[in-house]
């Protein structure tokens, strides 16, 4: 049994325990109902029935809250876009009601501003992936800041929002830059190396069996095979009960 399923069973058992305690505190035990029947006092019985109904509603609300709010969350992220493959991905995510995170390359933002606008308008989170897709640590601080700030400005000109998150290309980050820039680096926990293969099954099988709560999946929306793999991953993990969220939700919670 997966860890989150076990957690849910424990939560439901806890909710049942709460139900028993609430019933006893409210005096709606079988004994009380028997006594009431014997006494045949209509108004008292009505009052007890109302209390019982209210208690049932409370219990039902507690159980519903437990079930609805405790889906295991997971994030799917896309680097290197936008590209000509991105619109098909956006269509698929929209159909499935899924929000993703896109770490955009500045050069591509300039080439496909309409796609950036669409990513933003459809509720996905946008992050920075530098202007030229460069390894930050190989640059001077000034060059690195130029790469990040230029991309940030290009995105902000389209969305009206400053970018808060960066995924440094190749996963290499220069911590000192956080002294000058108001950005948070976001890495990943599941990397199927989708850019090395066109085999969709291979990518899907490297992600789905190992996916767990709070994982951040790394893919690239500049390959048709990656887009198809992403949508299959979403379908399979949703069927397993995962809720897809943008990375800020995982980092802030
Ligand atoms: Zn990249």
Image (cartoon, helix red, strand yellow):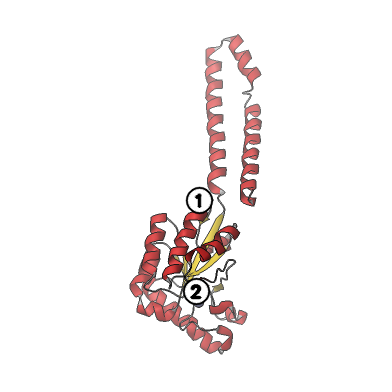
Q: Which quarter of the image is occupied by the C terminus? A: bottom right
Of marks 2 and 1, which one's residue comes earlier in the chain?
2
Residue 126 lies, with reference to residue 150, above or below; the image says above
Residue sitting at 65 percent across and 28 percent down?
25
- Examine the image and state in which quarter residue 26 appears: top right
Q: Does the CB distance between marks 2 and 1 fall below 8 Å?
A: no
Q: Compare residues 15 and 238 and report the one nearer the observer.
A: 238
Left or right of 62: which side holds 104? left
Task: Between residue 230 and residue 48, name the one nearer to us.
Answer: 230
Furthest-left residue in this view: 114
Front residue of this view, candidates 76 and 191:
191
Question: Residue 98, percent across and down?
Answer: 44, 57
Local SS, label 2: helix
Where does label 2 land, which residue?
195
Q: Which is nearer the eye, 68 or 153?
A: 68
Q: Against 84, is 246 above or below?
A: above
Percent position of residue 145, x then y: 51, 84
SS for tag 1? helix
Residue 85: quarter of image: bottom left
The residue that appears at 35% across and 75% down in the rendered structure is: 113
């Amino acid at each position: 049994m997966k860890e989150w399923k076990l957690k849910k069973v424990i939560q439901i058992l806890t909710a049942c325990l709460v139900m028993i305690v609430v019933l006893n505190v409210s005096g709606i035990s079988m004994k009380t109902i028997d006594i009431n029947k014997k006494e045949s006092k209509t108004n008292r019985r009505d009052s007890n029935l109302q209390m019982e109904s209210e208690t049932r509603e409370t219990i039902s609300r507690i159980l519903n809250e437990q079930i609805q709010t405790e889906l295991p969350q997971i994030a799917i992220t896309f680097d290197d876009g936008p590209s000509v493959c991105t619109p098909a991905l956006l269509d698929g995510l929209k159909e499935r009601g899924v929000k993703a995170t896109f770490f955009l390359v500045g050069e591509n933002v300039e080439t496909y501003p309409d796609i950036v606008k669409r990513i933003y308008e459809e509720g996905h989170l946008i992050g920075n992936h530098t202007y030229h897709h460069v390894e930050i640590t190989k640059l001077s601080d000034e060059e690195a800041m130029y790469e990040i700030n230029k991309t940030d400005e290009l995105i902000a000109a389209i969305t009206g929002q400053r970018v808060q998150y960066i995924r440094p290309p190749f996963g290499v980050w220069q911590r000192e830059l956080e002294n000058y820039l108001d950005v948070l680096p976001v890495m990943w926990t599941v990397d199927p190396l989708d850019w090395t293969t066109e085999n969709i099954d291979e990518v899907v099988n490297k992600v789905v069996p190992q996916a767990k709560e709070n994982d951040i999946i790394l893919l690239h929306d500049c390959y048709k095979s990656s887009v198809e793999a992403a949508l299959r991953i979403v379908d399979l993990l949703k069927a397993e009960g995962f809720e897809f969220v943008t990375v800020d939700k995982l980092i802030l919670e």
